[in-house]
């Protein structure tokens, strides 16, 4: 009887482990798919900006003889950014429970540091969309809307001063 209980517990533990592994792999697949799309939206502008910066540093270094090691490190980080996201996801999903010493989420200083990168990414894709016709602005209609708004605002202000 005691061996039956132990065997049943082992079967329950095995099923539980299989379920946890299946859910973990499903979550990994979802997160990897999201990173596949979102990561490239951040990587292309980052790589573009880093190439511009690196090229500018080469030009300046050609004239002044300054060291370009900092620019080289930045270019290397930008090149590895997209692949590093996949590695980070796999490492995070694969390991066991996180201990308190490992749980150091991003601090507010880090998050504020991301704002310029986020702004550049939005500007990059907006300009890209405008240049390549993905985003179309109906200028005559836009100018009519702005003129109507300004006219209504003027009438409202003039009406209040009377």
Image (cartoon, rainbow, N blue to C red):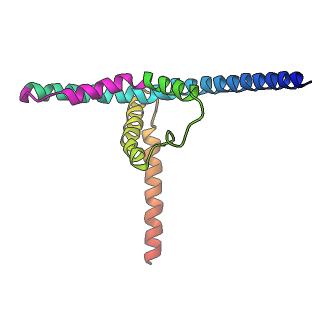
Is residue 37 rendered to the left or right of residue 109? right
Residue at 41% across, 34% down: 126
**Who is closer to the viewer here, 121 or 97?**
97
| Residues in magenta, as a range | 63-82
Q: Quick check: can you spot residue 162?
A: yes
Most common secondary structure along the magenta stretch: helix
Specify the quadrant of the image occupied by residue 56.
top left
**Who is closer to the viewer here, 95 or 134?**
95
Q: Position of residue 62 (x, y in %)?
A: 10, 24
Q: Quick check: can you spot residue 131?
A: no
- The N terminus lies in quadrant: top right
Residue at 43% across, 76% down: 161
Specify the quadrant of the image occupied by residue 20.
top right
**Who is closer to the viewer here, 121 or 92?**
92
Q: Is residue 4 above or below residue 126?
A: above
Point out the residue furthest to the bottom here. Answer: 162
- Queried whether the magenta region covers residue 137, the answer comes back as no
Residue at 63% across, 27% down: 27
Q: Is residue 129 above or below residue 152?
A: above
Residue at 39% across, 47% down: 112
Q: Position of residue 146 (x, y in %)?
A: 44, 51
Is residue 27 rendered to the left or right of residue 154? right
**Who is closer to the viewer here, 92 or 159?**
92
Q: Position of residue 115 (x, y in %)?
A: 39, 44
- The C terminus lies in quadrant: bottom left
């Amino acid at each position: 009887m005691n061996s039956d209980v132990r065997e049943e517990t082992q079967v329950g533990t095995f099923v539980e482990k299989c379920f946890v592994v299946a859910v973990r792999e499903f979550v990994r697949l979802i997160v990897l798919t999201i990173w596949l799309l979102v990561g490239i939206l951040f990587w292309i502008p980052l790589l573009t900006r880093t190439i511009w910066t690196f090229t500018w540093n080469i030009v300046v270094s050609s004239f002044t003889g300054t060291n370009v090691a900092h620019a080289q490190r930045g270019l290397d980080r930008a090149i590895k950014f997209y692949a590093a996201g996949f590695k980070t996801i796999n490492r995070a999903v694969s390991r066991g429970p996180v201990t308190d010493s490992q749980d150091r989420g991003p601090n507010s200083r880090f998050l504020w540091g991301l704002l310029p990168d986020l702004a550049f990414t939005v500007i990059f894709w907006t300009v890209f969309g405008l240049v390549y016709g993905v985003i179309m602005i109906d200028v005559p209609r836009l100018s009519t809307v702005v003129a109507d708004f300004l006219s209504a605002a003027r009438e409202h202000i003039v009406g209040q001063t009377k």
